[in-house]
Amino acid sequence: MSVETPVRRRVRVPRPRWILLVVVLGLFACILTVNGVVQGEFAQDGAAASTNDTDEVPDAALNGGPIIETDGTTTTTVTVPDNEIVLTFDDGPAPKYTPEILDVLAEYDVPGTFFMIGSQISQYPSLVKRVQEEGHEIGIHTFTHPDMASKSDWRRQVEMQETQFALAGAAGVTSVIFRPPYSSTVAALDNNTWSVMAEMGGDGYLTVVNNLDSRDWEEDVTQSDITEAVMPDDNAGAILLFHDGGGDRSKTATALKTVIPTLKNAGYTFTTVASLTGMSTVNPTADTRDWLLGLGVVGAVQLAKGTSVGFTYLLWVLGVLTVVRMLLFLVLGRRHATRYRKNPHPWGDPYTEPVTVIVPAYNEKEIIADTLGSLVASTHPIEIILVDDGSSDGTAEIAEGLGYPNVTILRQENAGKSTALNNGIAHAGTEVVVMMDGDTVFEPDTVEKLVQPFSTAEIGGVAGNAKVANRKGMIPIWQHIEYVVGFSIDRRAYDVMRCMATVPGAIGAFRKEALQQVNGLSEDTLAEDTDLTIAIIRAGWRVVYEERSRAWTEAPSTMGQLWRQRYRWSYGTMQAMWKHRRALFEKGPGGRFGRRGLLNLALFQTLLPLLSPLIDVFLIYGLFFLNPMKTAIAWLGMLAVQLFSTIYAFRLDKESMKPLWRVPLQQFVYRQLMYLVLIQSVLAALGGIRLGWQKLRRTGGLNALMGARLPTGDA
């Protein structure tokens, strides 16, 4: 009898950096949710339609006064004596209208009773404190102003308790009086509203309704309508209902200036709920526990509100900057595109001197024959140096077997791309050196067009136009779109502004004197191309973009490959930015690059992508808690801006428009992948992680991918 050994499954534990990201996004979502609940619009107060079901409502309540005390079995009420008035105000505090009303009450030296909403209390604690310090009463009007009769017992308790906490945190007091939202007079009581009052009475609350409603919540009400609505008949006492929040209350304070003196002249005095019920106060001091919890509630709401408002302003600023940048880049890109139209030879006499093409290679057996074959078909005189960086797949042997006479093969132990390129530069005997990747294919006239700017003495580097060869599948096509926009718009603009950040490793040329001046490629960063480009600019050389010089490369075709490639790029770019940070304060070409190029990289390629997860969360928040239509329009507007710039980039590069229907889909997959890569890169940079060669798994045969567009080369 054999006993099977249980198979232990490997449990993947999330890396701390992703746990941190999830925590940050979760916290941000919670903050926005709190703000959404607090800021959520509620229906304007007014009398809710009552039913005829009153069999559960005691006669004492239906026929009694507007102040109701009940424990569910025993009910007593208090009626306002003749010639006495209680002024009550619902739905506040509001930053505009509550102070106006307080000023009127102070002017006529009369008290008021304010039934406040907990969410408003949390937002405007200083107003609550002012109401309390000026001797007015504060009652509970729930936290979010729901119809309490339609809510569960748990929800009712939360509405009341959170409002009490907010009041304790704002003013250091609690309240024993309650007014249900959408309540009216005792005549409007029915079974539904009574169940709420009975429950609140069991918790120790006095329910206060009203005798006369000013109807200041109606849209077309006038000041005379308000005044007329609150005038009692036959000197009867009354609780009057006004509003200091929940909508436009601009007429309420003005109407009070008529109502109060009119009632005083009629012999009325103004009193409070506490005076009518014989209590010393309806706002006893909060105990320490409630006060501390209240501070937490108020603080949380203040934090949520501040975060939401601040992030909204930040989005507006970033949105404006993005649109301005796009318009500027489109104008500069157009200016660059007309360069050859105005002057077929903007660089002077044609550059005809031989150049050296350096090909660093590491395990490129699938593509190296195509790469070298494309080079030997060049229309410009070239020498080719293949630097094999310790390949283990026979890359160098394949190159030797091709038998090309102008190809020199250098072998070295695996030391990285920068070392391989420096090795090639050291063996180059020409004034100009062209660098490319071992997985890239040139067109016959690529080198000829790439080196023409070197006829101008100030040119130290030239960036070529890298194209995605494999355009089948969503991931490669998304990269194709990204490449076209990045080269056709961005690099053209960088050229005009003289702040080219990167000569791409796939296709670039440098004056050897410039390379020697900056001591070649550095191993300080993983983005050796960006590091080298910035160093050459800081040394006083000009770097330009030659869009006619094209190279074809195979882009990653899976998410994993793309992640690894972009992770290296992002991490290396941040290293280069940090290394050359002093360029911000330099004079001359270096300072110009620092204040244009580095700031552009920092803002639009680092900060904005880092904020993208929060922007996505904020978009969802806007759809649920803000105006969904305005939120959707804003998002579609930014998408339209992006689509417009993409179309223009494709037109400048004379590319087919067919792939552009994928642009909206980029917002839901590709964009998220890119910002997650950047976030991981930032965290890796903070942790000081180093990366080695990130190899793609090549499918080989770019000639087959490109068909007749690429040369095969002759042995």
Image: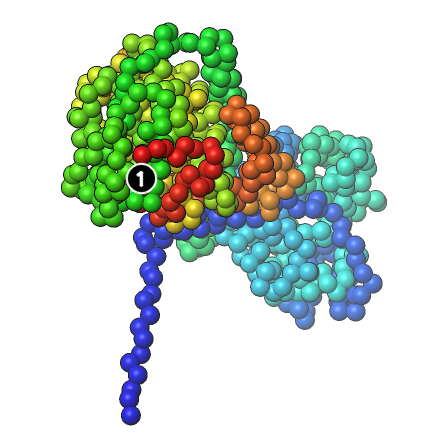
> Residue flagged by tag 1: what amino acid is it?
Ile
At a point 44% along the width and 25% down the height, the residue shown is: 490
Which of the pair 517/62 is nearer the observer? 517
At a point 69% along the width and 60% down the height, the residue shown is: 149
At a point 38% along the width and 50% down the height, the residue shown is: 560
At a point 36% along the width and 7% down the height, the residue shown is: 349
Res. 645 image quadrant: top right
- Residue 295 appears anywhere in the view: no
Which of the pair 249/347 is nearer the observer? 347
Please give left or right for residue 305 compared with residue 69 in the image.
left
Give the image location of residue 350, x and y in percent: 36, 11
Label 1: how many residues lie within 10 Å, few (<14), some (14-19) or many (20+)?
many
Give the image location of residue 173, x and y in percent: 50, 49
Please give left or right for residue 100 compared with residue 463 in the image.
right
Q: Which quarter of the image is occupied by the N terminus? A: bottom left
Task: Indicate the secondary structure of the residue bearing disc 1.
Answer: helix
User: Which residue is outermost to the bottom?
Assistant: 1
Which of the pair 100/249 is nearer the observer? 249
Q: Which quarter of the image is occupied by the C terminus? A: top left
Residue at mark 1: 368
Give the image location of residue 446, x and y in percent: 39, 24
* In the rendered image, the vertical position of residue 637 relative to residue 277, given as above or below: above
* In the rendered image, the vertical position of residue 75 relative to residue 147, given as above or below: below
- Residue 166 appears anywhere in the view: yes
- What is the image's colouring? rainbow
* In the rendered image, the vertical position of residue 544 relative to residue 125, given as above or below: above
* In the rendered image, the vertical position of residue 529 relative to residue 154, given as above or below: above
Give the image location of residue 380, x and y in percent: 34, 20
Number of numbered markers:
1
